[in-house]
Image: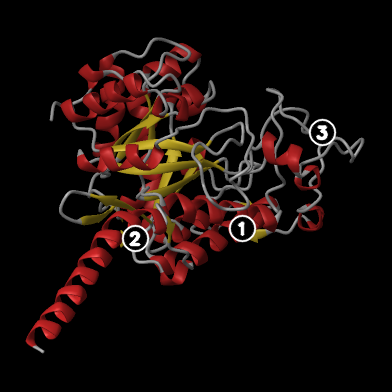
Amino acid sequence: MLKTIHNKYFYIGLTLIVILVLAFFVSPILLPATFVVNFKAGNLASSTIPMATSTIATSTSVVIKKVITHEKTPEAVKAIYMTACVAGTPSFRAKLLKFANETEINSIIIDVKDYTGTISFDIDHPSFKDNAGTGCRVKDMVGFVETLHQNNIYVIARITAFQDPYITKLHPEWAVKKNSDRNIVWKDRKGISFVDAGNKEMWQYLVDLGLESYAAGFDEINYDYIRFPSDGDMKDIYFPWSNDILINNIARPAIGTSTPAVKSGKSIVMREFFEYLHEHFAPAGIPISADLFGMTATNYDDLNIGQVLEDAAPNFDFIAPMVYPSHYPVGFMGYKSVAEVNAHGYDIVNYSMKIAAERLVKIGESPLKLRPWLQDNDYPVPYTPAMVRAQIQATYDAGLTSWMLWDAGNTYTQSALLTD
């Protein structure tokens, strides 16, 4: 009888060993290599998001890894811009990471959707997974963002909003049209088409892209081209989705001042879009920022593109006026030539940001929401290290702490920056 019991437990033990061995070798095959946690904005945590995991077998255990985390927003963001083309080129992006590590730079802005409408990395979402834009892509975006985090870099996703020739080709009914023939898509002087900013289907597309970018590890979502078109044949232009508001030419007082009035319905369309973004990101604690024309800092009208500083400020965590000296017209602040405008970068940035800060205080918003884009490129004159640094100092002297450097070629002036 003892022998029978002994044999019984022997076979039970042997069976358990076989089951454990099979589980060890088979489970990595049966388990999905990757899973994505679907979420709604209101349920999304702002610190650590479990988005992607992979199962890896080792000689002693099964390791579950790849949890998406996020960097806290630095008190003072000091950033450089990186195109998707550069982000997808390991040698070039490594140079910029080295540049950041050797200087005061603590943040990098990367294109997630550029002016071509291309989504720069693979997203398993019906609106984005079949994107066939002609721009650059980054095969290992999630891994690259993780690498930046390991280097204590805050990573911002730049999304070009209403300038989108890919979407206007896919959905021509969403596009800005010619008024002379409303079946023809309107294009600006560079030949680029726009989605009508009043199209709420596009609003949802932009929100979904922002949420997916955050789930991939980006720490902040930055929206650019959140405006109506500004150049091209503006006399032959029609906005099929915004037309009812625009033709009524609704007027309302400009917030923060009793003098000029905002007379363009474009500002109402844009204000509603700003509010829409706020409603979808704020409950989740996801930081969002807005790129605005530089002159929104000093103009109280909407510049005929729909942007009003006081409309944007309450709806975004950060506001980024593009106060590049090169973008200011002759005559601004009394400067009489292009050379004179660009020779006074400090004065233009300081004046503009001081006024913007005062306007935010008047409506109860913190001026530290302001994070200007500054110029580090040779347009239309060579920009010396001193000229770049002068813009940074002008920002500080306006009482602000954060700034971002722009160069479409991604070659930045190291000698203009402090060493780390």
The chosen color scheme is: secondary structure
Tag 1–tag 2 contact (CB < 8 Å): no
Identify which residue is drawn at 34% across, 60% down: 49
Across and down, in percent, residue 366 comes to: 33, 57
Tag 3–tag 1 contact (CB < 8 Å): no
Q: Earlier in the sequence, mark 1 or mark 2?
A: 2
Identify which residue is drawn at 33% across, 25% down: 93
Residue placed furthest toward the right: 181
Give the answer, above or below, for where 25 lies relative to 292. Answer: below
User: The residue under label 1 is which amino acid type?
Assistant: Gln
Identify which residue is drawn at 79% across, 34% down: 186
Mark 3 neighbour density, 10 Å: few (under 14) some (14–19) many (20 or more): few
Residue placed furthest toward the left: 2
- For disc 3, the marked residue is 235
Identify which residue is drawn at 85% across, 36% down: 178
- For disc 1, the marked residue is 204
In the structure shown, which secondary structural element does the residue marked by tag 1 occupy? helix
Q: Nearer the viewer, mark 3 or mark 1?
A: 1
User: The residue under label 2 is which amino acid type?
Assistant: Ile
In this orientation, which residue lies closer to the viewer: 90 or 309?
Answer: 90
Task: Check the picture and name the quadrant holding the N terminus.
Answer: bottom left
In the structure shown, which secondary structural element does the residue marked by tag 3 occupy? loop
Q: Earlier in the sequence, mark 3 or mark 2?
A: 2
Across and down, in percent, residue 345 comes to: 36, 24
Q: Earlier in the sequence, mark 3 or mark 1?
A: 1
The residues tagged by marks 1 and 2 sit, at their Cα atoms, a distance apart of 21 Å
The residues tagged by marks 3 and 2 sit, at their Cα atoms, a distance apart of 48 Å
User: The residue under label 3 is which amino acid type?
Assistant: Lys
Residue 49 numbered tag: 2
Across and down, in percent, residue 420 comes to: 13, 30
Q: Is residue 366 visible?
A: no
In the structure shown, which secondary structural element does the residue marked by tag 2 occupy? strand
